[in-house]
Image (cartoon, grey):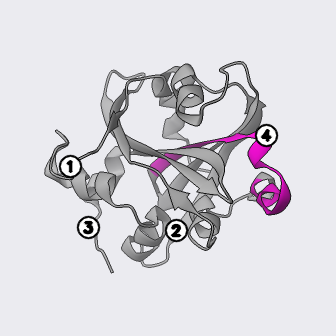
Amino acid sequence: MIVPIPAALNQNSFDVRWYTLRRPAAPDAPNIWRKWLLDRGSLTQHLLQASNGDFKVEVVRQIWGRPTRSEALALGISPRQIALIREVQLVGLGQPWVFARTIIPATTLTGKQRELNFLGNRSLGTVLFRDPTMRRGALQISRLKIRSGETVWARRSMFKLANKPLLVAEVFLPALQQVNYRKK
């Protein structure tokens, strides 16, 4: 098993100010990160393509816990409300490329969406982008500090499945800089 860079991230890493993207040319992110940050399509599909299929999802942890204040505010729930928190590494060519953190309120996990409890090593993107009821909210970006003092670029957005919300944050790890972004 790969030693997770997420050890350098903690829940407080995600309790930062996120900026909604209103104009695609607006972010201060370096060019190397802009295409990754701004693409509204399936990140899983881009990573599968970039890795020529040498791609996997590794679950770091999946627990019932409290979201950060920032996450609760984005979801419109109380920070005291318990939610399913799923953290995974998206690994391409044997290297962690992305750390993803998903917050799913308990009220979302009803009906067909109950399957989100049981993703295991399947990509959340494969479920989201195949669901005809899926709607994606605005992209937000931020820079997150990791324990080494470094900062990494991240994006997050609200998804709704059958009008039920979940929040997905994707942290672009340094190894992804070596990967060519190719859009189909």
Q: Nearer the viewer, residue 16 or 77?
A: 77
Label 3 sits on a secondary structure element that is loop
Residue 94 is at least partly visible in this image: no
Tag 3: amino acid: Asn
Q: Which residue is mark 2?
A: 55
CA distance separating discs 2 and 1: 31 Å
Tag 1: amino acid: Arg
User: Of callouts 4 and 3, which one flags the residue occurring earlier in the amino acid sequence?
Assistant: 4
- What percent of the width, then of the height, locates residue 103? 64, 39
Tag 4: amino acid: Ala
CA distance separating discs 1 and 3: 24 Å
Dot 1 alpha-carbon crowd within 10 angstroms: few under 14, some 14 to 19, many 20 or more: few
Dot 3 alpha-carbon crowd within 10 angstroms: few under 14, some 14 to 19, many 20 or more: few
Asked if the residue at tag 1 contacts the one at tag 2, i.e. Cβ–Cβ closer than 8 Å, the answer is no
Label 2 sits on a secondary structure element that is strand
Q: Nearer the viewer, mark 2 or mark 1?
A: 1
Label 4 sits on a secondary structure element that is helix
Tag 2: amino acid: Phe
Q: Nearer the viewer, mark 1 or mark 3?
A: 1
Q: Which residue is mark 4?
A: 106
Q: Which residue is mark 1?
A: 23
Residue occupying image coordinates x 46% and y 66%: 42
Dot 2 alpha-carbon crowd within 10 angstroms: few under 14, some 14 to 19, many 20 or more: many
Residue occupying image coordinates x 56% and y 52%: 159
CA distance separating discs 1 and 4: 33 Å
